[in-house]
Amino acid sequence: MLHAGLDFSRKRLDVCLIGDDGQVAGRLAVPPDRDGLHGLVRRLAPSGEPVQAVIESMTGARFVHDTLEGLGWEVMIADAQRVKGLAPLACKTDKIDSQVLAVLSHRDLVPEIWLPDPRVRREREQARFRLHLVKHKSSLKNRIHSTMITFGHPCPVSDLFGAAGRELLDRLEVPDPWRGTINASLQLIDDLERRIGEINKELKLSGVDHPYVPLLLTVPGIGWVLAYTIAAEIGDITRFPSAKKLCGYTGLCPLVYQSGERDRRGPLTKHGPKYLRWAMLEATMHACRHEAYRERYQRNKQRLGKQRGAKVAQVDIARKLTTAVWHMLTRNEPFNPTAAAGGASYRLAA
C-alpha cells in the first residue's frame, strides 16, 4: 500500500508518498482542483497499489476527500491541532507537512475526525448561514448607533429599528455621506431580516421531522433555531460514548496543565464547532433562571464575584445543559431535571 500525505493550499496540492517499508517513494505537486486530482490518480494508477491518503482538516479538505474517494482511494481527514501535538516541527514547509501526514498514515497514528453525511452537512449549512446573516445585521445596527453618537444624537426609543425608531432616523439631521450610510444600512437590514425570516421558516419545517429537535425543544432556553443548530452540530449522538465526551466536543471545558503535584486550569479549550458552543451559551442565558439551575448559577456567581462570577457560572450551566442533552438524545427522553444537593442533576422521565 502507498501512504500519501496531502498538503492543500490555494495554488497546489503537495503530495508525499511512502511505501510499506517506510521510505519516501516519491514527491509531486498537482493543481488543487478536480482535474489535478484526477491527474494525480492516473499518475499513480500504473503501480497497481492501493492508496491511503491523509489531509489535514481545513477549507477544501472535504472536496479533496470526496473526489479522491470517488476515484477509489481511501482518504482520512486528520485533526490539524492533534497532528501538531503528535508531530511538533522545528521547520514547517508544505513538503514537510505532507511527509508528516504520510508517516502518520504508515504508522496508523492518524487522529481522524468524524465526517458528517450529506444530510447533516445541509442542516449545518442552513443553521450556520442564518447565524452569518444575523451577525451582519447586528454589525449594521451597531454602525447606525455609532453614527448617532458621533453627531451627538441620543436614542430616546427602546428599539431604534422599530416603527418609532425608524421615524426618528428619518428626521435625524446628519450630513452626507453619513446620511446615505444610514439609509443604505436600513435597506440592508430590511433585506437581511426578510432572508433570516425565510430561513427560520425552513428550519422550523425541517425540524418537525428531525429526531432530535422535538426533544431539544423541551430544554429551558432552547427554541426552534437553537434546537436545530444544536442537532445539526451534534450530528449523531452515538459517536459520543459519554456526556463528558460531548462536553469536551463543545469546547466548554477548561484547559488543564498537570505535572507532578501541579494542577493548573486555564481558559476554555474552545475546541469543536464554535456554532455548537454559541448555541449552548445562548440557551444558558434563559436556563440560568430555570428552577433546576437558578440556585447553582447564583451560588457560583456570588462565590466568584460579580464580574468574573457571571461568566464562569454561565459556562458551568452550559456544561450542565450539555450533559442533559446527551442523556436526552441517547435515551430518547424529554428534559426532566430534579433538584439535588449541590445543584441540578439530570433524571430521565419515567
Image: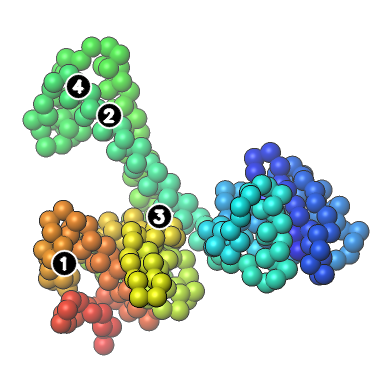
Label 3 neighbour load within 10 Å: few <14, some 14-19, many 20+:
few
Of marks 2 and 4, which one's residue comes earlier in the chain? Answer: 2
* Type of the residue with mark 4: Thr
Separation (CA) of disc 3 from disc 4:
33 Å
Of marks 1 and 3, which one's residue comes earlier in the chain? Answer: 3
Disc nearest the viewer among 2 and 4: 4
Of marks 1 and 4, which one's residue comes earlier in the chain? Answer: 4
Could you tell me which quadrant the N terminus lies in?
bottom right
- Specify how the rendered protein is coloured: rainbow
Of marks 2 and 1, which one's residue comes earlier in the chain? Answer: 2
* Type of the residue with mark 1: Asn
**Please, is residue 20 above or below residue 164 in the view?**
below
Residue occupied by mark 1: 300
Q: Is any atom of residue 66 visible in this view?
A: no
Viewer-proximal residue, 116 or 23? 23
Residue occupied by mark 2: 143
Label 2 neighbour load within 10 Å: few <14, some 14-19, many 20+:
some
Q: Determine which of the numbered discs, if any, sits on residue 274 in the image.
A: 3
**Please, is residue 88 above or below residue 321 in the view?**
above
* Type of the residue with mark 2: Arg
Disc 3, SS: helix
Separation (CA) of disc 2 from disc 1:
36 Å
Q: Is any atom of residue 172 visible in this view?
A: yes
Disc nearest the viewer among 1 and 3: 1
Residue occupied by mark 4: 150
Q: Residue at x 63, y 49 (%)?
A: 92
Of marks 3 and 4, which one's residue comes earlier in the chain? Answer: 4
